[in-house]
Amino acid sequence: MAKKNTVETKVLTKAYELFLTKGYKHTTMDELALALGMSKKTLYKYYPGKLELLAASFEMLKTKLSSKVEAISDNKYIPFPLKLKSTLTTIATYLAPINPELFEDLREFAPEIWEDLRDYINESAYVRFHQLILQGVDQGLVNPQLNISVVVMLYASAVQSLLDPKFRSQFPQLIQDGMKLSPAELYDQAVSVIYKGILTDEAREEFMNG
């Protein structure tokens, strides 16, 4: 049983790597079998098809992400600012590699998996993020006058929109050309703008007192 689980993990890890680099549409079972050094017949013993592999690889992703975020959230010895940064970094680390092309593939060829992943991100990542912001309010480290739901939705909508090629295509080419950033950089920029603002310290003080 242990050997079977080890092989399955190896298969899922390699499949996920191929999905990230080539997308779902252009990844084949032949390529995966070759990359794993096994026959396609052997591969089918573990997973009956590419769609099942896709679903299982994202289940593995969700399990890993949930475990990491829960560990950070439940740790009473991490100060809030570090806990906030660690949570956002962890979410970005796991979700940023899912490039826009793969998202498009999911929506077109695996809509149920796409909806499940979207629901997971909303319910797990963002609900926990909301709870974390509330901890900051309780500790006097987050402005209590802010609407926390708006804060979370700003971050979520910014990230989801920026990664959506259809949304980006609506803008003039000049704006699109300035968006040549990796998904990880997009996450980082979204966090920086929302939680630090776009003003310098001097300008922020003048804005607040103006």
Image (cartoon, rainbow, N blue to C red):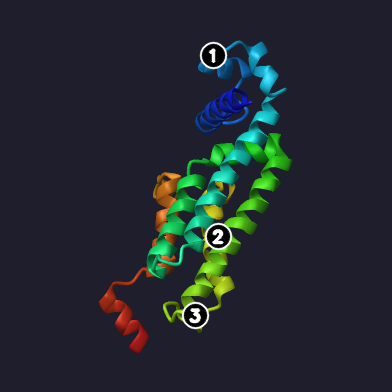
Can you identify the residue that label 2 sits on?
156
Could you tell me how far apart the alpha carbons at marks 3 and 2 are, in whole angstroms? 22 Å
Relative horizontal placement of residue 55, taking residue 67 as reference (left or right): right
The residue furthest front is 1
- SS label for mark 1: helix
For discs 1 and 3, the disc positioned in front in the rendered view? 3
Q: Residue at x 43, y 81 (%)?
A: 140
Residue type at tag 3: Asp
Relative horizontal placement of residue 36, taking residue 29 as reference (left or right): left
In terms of image quadrants, where is residue 64?
Answer: top right
Can you identify the residue that label 1 sits on?
34
Q: Residue at x 42, y 69 (%)?
A: 80
Q: Residues within 10 Å of mark 2 (few under 14, many from 20)?
A: some
Residue type at tag 1: Leu
Compare marks 1 and 3 and give the one earlier in the sequence: 1
> Are the residues at dot 3 and dot 2 in contact (C-beta closer than 8 Å)?
no
Can you identify the residue that label 3 sits on?
138
Along the line of sight, the residue nearer the viewer: 69 or 94: 69
Residue type at tag 2: Ala
Picture coordinates of residue 156, whole percent (x, y) = 55, 60
